[in-house]
Image (cartoon, helix red, strand yellow):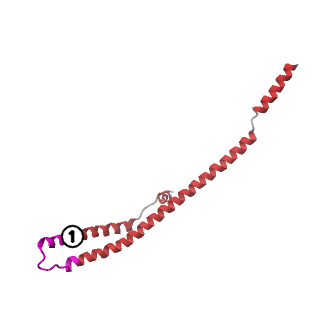
Amino acid sequence: MVLVAGAAVAAVTGMKVFDYNRDNFMEDREQRLKMELAQRKFRITQGKLWREDVRGIVSLTEKKMSILLLVDVLLLSFTVNLWTEGRLAETTPAWLTMGMQIAIVIAFFFLGAGSLAGDARRGGGPELPDQIADTAG
């Protein structure tokens, strides 16, 4: 009899110790799901903020390019003016005159290439990944 009572007590104790608590498990799963969904929303918001930052940087670059293009064209006009109207004295050595001509030609081509590159840059414009995705769907 004592043996049966001891077995019954052990069985009841074992049931209580190893009892599966489904209510706590379901509550935990619900809270974990809410946390994971909130994390996804935060990541989506973070991605949108990163895209806004990239748009801001690109727009600043475009604005700077338009200002630099204006400065570049002004410098190019000064170079052309110096090339056509800038004359050295007749007693200037030939090597100095040649050096000045070479410097003016190099400046002309450098500024001309910058003007062409700046103008081409203004025409196209960058295409961001979300714009590609928007046009695809």
Compared with residue 10, is residue 101 higher up or lower down, i.e. above or below? below
Q: How many marks?
A: 1
Left or right side of 87 for 38: right
The residue at 34%/74% (across/down) is 71
Magenta segment? 82-101
Q: Position of residue 1 (x, y in %)?
A: 88, 19
Magenta residue check for 121: no
Compared with residue 75, is residue 27 higher up or lower down, i.e. above or below? above
The residue at 50%/60% (across/down) is 51
Q: Position of residue 90 (x, y in %)?
A: 12, 79
Magenta residue check for 92: yes
Give the camera-side residue of 93 and 86: 93
Left or right side of 5 for 91: left
Where does label 1 land, which residue? 103
Compared with residue 8, is residue 49 higher up or lower down, i.e. above or below? below
Give the camera-side residue of 64 and 96: 96
The residue at 78%/30% (across/down) is 15
Which residue is farthest right? Answer: 1
Is the residue marked by circle 1 packed among few (<14), some (14-19), or many (20+) residues within 10 Å? few
Report the amino acid beneath label 1. Answer: Ala
The residue at 59%/55% (across/down) is 42
Secondary structure at badge 1 equals helix
Q: Position of residue 106 (x, y in %)?
A: 23, 68
Q: Position of residue 62 (x, y in %)?
A: 41, 68
Q: Quadrant of residue 28?
A: top right
Q: Quadrant of residue 89?
A: bottom left
* Magenta stretch: helix, strand or loop mostly: helix
